[in-house]
Amino acid sequence: MTDAQLQSLVERISMTVFGQPFLHHATFNARLRTTGGRYRLQDHNIDINPKMLTEHDMATLVGVIKHELVHYHLHLSGQPYQHVSSEFKQLLKQVDGLRFAPRNEAAVKTRKYHYVCQKCAMDYYRQRQIDLNKYVCGRCQGKLQLNVN
């Protein structure tokens, strides 16, 4: 899907679901890593993580677009648009948008190192190796041990 196709999809969803036009730009932004999309307050544009389409299905992409359009339409109408506001939660539920972007399971599997506290058995998963002489358990300050499985 290209940016032009995304733009037309966002405009179509805005008209059919919200009954209001989307007058700004929607583009894919590959720099987004931990979020499905972003509504920019300064210029009212929407950025969408391309992984929402490549690693997930079309329904997930539509759910993320609806989420960002809730921010967009609430902000432009002068209502509270933050995640914590009751107006946001109510409108998001009404349009059946996604509250959270789905997690990338491939990123969870890339954790190479598994450390276990010798005192309280707390698990720590890290992508990089840590210095066991320098770091201790955050819960009980016990020694950490590399778990080899």
Image: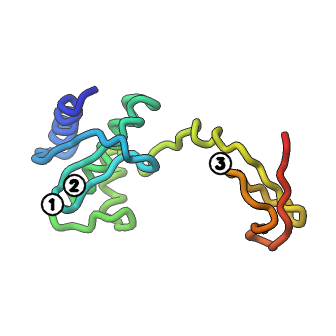
Identity of the amino acid at label 1?
Leu
Q: CA distance from mark 3 to mark 1?
A: 41 Å
Q: Residue at x 38, y 31 (%)?
A: 53
Q: Which mark is residue 72?
A: 2
Q: Residue at x 81, y 73 (%)?
A: 140
CB contact under 8 Å: marks 1 and 2: yes
The residue under label 3 is 127
Comparing 136 with 129, the one in front is 129
Q: How many numbered marks, from 0 up?
A: 3
The residue under label 1 is 76
Determine whether 44 is above or below 36 in the image. below
> What crowding class fits label 3: few (fewer than 14 Cα within 10 Å), some (14-19), or many (20 or more)?
few
Q: Quadrant of the C terminus?
A: top right
Labels 3 and 2: the sequence-earlier one: 2
Nearer the camera: disc 3 or disc 1: 3
Comparing 116 with 81, the one in front is 116
Can residue 148 be seen by looking at this rendering? yes
Identity of the amino acid at label 3?
Gln
Whole-percent x, y for residue 65 in the image: 30, 42
Nearer the camera: disc 3 or disc 2: 3
Labels 3 and 1: the sequence-earlier one: 1
Secondary structure found at label 1 = helix
Secondary structure found at label 2 = helix
> What crowding class fits label 2: few (fewer than 14 Cα within 10 Å), some (14-19), or many (20 or more)?
many
Q: Quadrant of the N terminus?
A: top left
CB contact under 8 Å: marks 3 and 1: no
